Image (cartoon, helix red, strand yellow):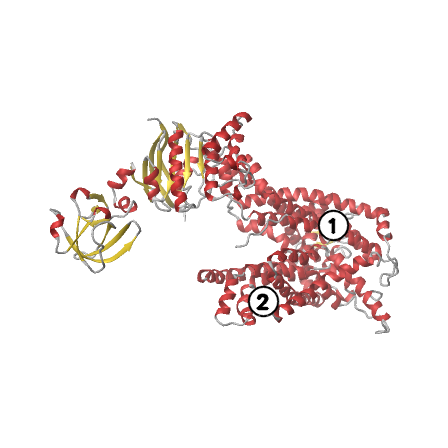
Amino acid sequence: MEEMVRLEHITKKFGNNIIIPDFNITIYDGEFITLLGPSGCGKTTLLRMIAGLESPTSGKIFLADQDVTSLAPYKRDVNMVFQNYALFPHMNVEDNIRFGLTMKKVPKEEQETRINQVLYLTQLENFRTRSPLQMSGGQQQRVAIARALVNNPKVLLLDEPLGALDYKLRKKMQLELKNLQRGLGLTFIYVTHDQEEALTMSDRVVVMHNGILEQDASPDVIYHAPKSKFVASFIGENNFFSLDDNKALAIRPQKIQLCHEEDENSAGNNPVKYGTIVDVVFCGTIDKIYVRMDNSNDTVVAYQYLNDALPWKCDTRVGVWWEKKDEVIVEK
Amino acid sequence: MKKNWHSAVLVSYSLAILAFLYLPLLILTLYSFNDSRMNAVWTGFTFKWYASLLHNRRVIEALTNSLIIACISTLVSTTLGTMAAIALNRFKYKFKGILNGLLYLPILIPEIVMGLSLLVLFSQTGIALGKNTLILAHITFCISFVIITVSARLEGRRFDLEEAASDLYATPWQAFRYITLPLALPGIIAGGLIAFTLSIDDFVISFFVAGPNSTTLPLYIYAMVKRGISPEINALSTCMRMTTICLVIISQLLQPKKKSN
Amino acid sequence: MGEKRRGHSGEMKKGKLLVVPGMLWLAIFFALPMLIVVAVSFATRNAYGQVIFNFTLSNYQRFFESLYLRIFATTIFTAIVTTVITFLMGYPLAYTISILPKKWQQPSLVLVMIPFWINFLIRSYAWVIILRSQGIINTFLLKMGLIEKPLTLLYNDYAVMLGMIYALVPFMVLPIYVSIEQLDKRLLEAASDLGAPPLTAFRKITLPLTMPGIAAGSILVFISSLGMFVVPDIMGGAKSALIGNIIQNQFLAARDWPFGSALSIVLGILALLLIMLYYKVLEGQKGVTNNEKKLA
């Protein structure tokens, strides 16, 4: 696969704060890659460095094998979809989309063709002359995407674009973005703190924490084989049992089985630990059962699906067990 | 608004003060139409004082001077002030204290001090007093007002729009021209109008730096007042006031609608 | 909240230079002349009125002569009275505007501020034709037979004060209005909820929290009043000279620029001290209002 973006030994300091100590990554053509992490982990900073809106303190940035580290944003062949869209309020939809083409002095005829294409792609044909101020969040979102895509960038950067949308709209847009990327074959670099979003859309997820790359893998591997405790706890819910100073055992709540105290045979050959249910939380599709373990005072959370067995109640004594194959060892 | 006697007292008191502010001005205007030369007694309605103004060579000269000075001062101070306001709004500067001092002191210091300091400057550097010194002086006190006006309107400025423009291949100049400037334009025009009004109306500073052949309208009015009462002064004052009022109203109309929380 | 950043690449930093022309102009035509005036205040003059730069403190010493001190004291007194009265007029006006329906607030503010834009000269002159011995009031009173001789309403200290108050009320209104407008009305609702009648709520909540506006307006009025010479010149008599008139005189008729400079420097320093005092008070207030915001 062709290399699209390469970051070599990128560091970023603000004053005396080291935001990013030493970041390296290669992104390939046609990938949908997500930078995932909590607020302040440096993911947006990295994205902005690729766009050219921030400069790294040291290190190099390559776009399609060209060193662009010192290149200004308007000279780079990447485009960004901003977090709050940054649509120009004094221009209508069409002029917003046209802006990049005008700056690059694309001939008028070609401008029209490309604008029409992208309006069709983002289903905005009826909004040509509308002012962005009169449009809903979801519509503004699509204008921002259209405005970036019309320039045929090699790489599209998206900075938490769906953050301001409500749940249902967000889900819908996630699918649309994914289809767009697949259909156009572009490289998308996506930034979010929403791990569900990252797992849904990406070919590859890069989990970041305090400017450090924690794990770089496909969504499946990130979820089922997290390398570190941070990744294991950031992605979905997880239960941890300490093994020694460096390692812990992680087991997903949905892999935890519960049985009545007397009924230990249902666990088969698997070891059973005992505890008391302290809380049962209704979450729509599942119940979350919180169990305080006898020996360690840890609380373990297990998911129970409603059509499973009998509903559990607080203060019931339970046995907690799982299959060995579902265990994951993580670094602390 | 609670309708009780508190509000009634408040409103009446306020209206009284408003009357106090406007009554003298209204009287001034009224008597500019008085036929009699001796102001107080009303003898008839006439436009003759306004007509005589049009024939008064020195009034025309003073008016022309005021307009020329105001136009040039406005242009220069608005340009310099807008540039400074945009930069101050966008970037962090190391010597914020000094910059703020330079910016606000011209407005806070009594005008008389500013006027005489310019007189001293010009005389010590051998610059002859005249239209040029008036222009230089007017630009000086206008810049601060322009910066403050434009800055206030820049408050809601969105840097992400400029970043978006840069991301869309606009050079810094293009981003400024297509994005920053159009959005700041109402504020800039307001600043310009304020500069123009200040310049036309200025008396104190002009008093110190005007030369013998360069009178402005306010200076001319002052000379007339010193000589004695005459309805021409009323007429001239009324004309000036009307102009001022129009300019102020126009600049207010350019203010962005405040969004209520 | 996400990360907030405003990175500049090298080329964008050039924009920083935009501030230079304006500031340079102010440095040359505002700061520099001030420095020259300071220098001149320590100089002397020759028979032709030209400035000779021999260092001397005589100008400042002259200031401490009883005559000038008295005039300075009168000026300060006038300024204080003006400030107080404009406050008593300005605050209610500002408050009334702030309780008007939103639609009327901006136009009302403009209405109050229009006189502010009309220069002092014209406004003082308006009073002259009202107050002079053949002016409106006297003519009216004479005609009504209420008096036999015209009253000398003009050319005295009271006329000057009236003129100043008239000129400076708008200066007081705007800062106070801004302060009242920024007041979180929910605080008053909370006070009412806790049993405070309107007047008490005003005294204990509104008034203290609008102090910044009151201070700003007062400083503006006080400093403007100190330096005024137009109003005393037109509406005051020979005995109503204020420091502004003295300074003006030194620069024109008397041609004693060093002395005039010294007087202006004294005036300027007084103004500066007040401004610094204002900022100190403002800093203190900021702490208070920030805490209030956290509690709200």
Q: Residue at x 12, y 47 (%)?
A: A268
Q: Position of residue C188 (x, y in %)?
A: 52, 66
- Please indicate whether residue C205 sits to the left or right of residue A168 in the image: right
Q: Position of residue B110 (x, y in %)?
A: 66, 57
Quadrant hosting residue C121: bottom right
- Do dots 2 and 1 share one subunit? yes
In the displayed structure, would residue C135 be above or below residue B171? Answer: below
Label 2 crowd (10 A; few <14 / some 14-19 / many >=20): few
Please state the chain letter of the residue tagged with numbered disc 1 in the rendered image.
B
- Please indicate whether residue B34 sits to the left or right of residue B201 in the image: right
Label 1 crowd (10 A; few <14 / some 14-19 / many >=20): some
**Is any atom of residue A185 visible in this view?**
yes
Q: Position of residue A100 (x, y in %)?
A: 51, 32
Amino acid at pointer 2: Lys
Q: Residue at x 13, y 49 (%)?
A: A266
Please state the chain letter of the residue tagged with numbered disc 2 in the rendered image.
B
According to the image, label 2 marks what residue? B2
Asked if the residues shown at circle 2 and circle 1 are in contact, with their CB atoms under 8 angstroms apart, the answer is: no
Mark closest to the chain's N terminus, 2 or 1: 2
Q: Nearer the viewer, residue C151 or A214?
A: A214
Quarter of the picture containing the N terminus of chain A is: top left
**Disc nearest the viewer among 2 and 1:** 2
Q: Position of residue C175 (x, y in %)?
A: 60, 59
According to the image, label 1 marks what residue? B243
**Is any atom of residue C164 visible in this view?**
no
Badge count: 2
Give the SS element for disc 2. loop
Amino acid at pointer 1: Thr
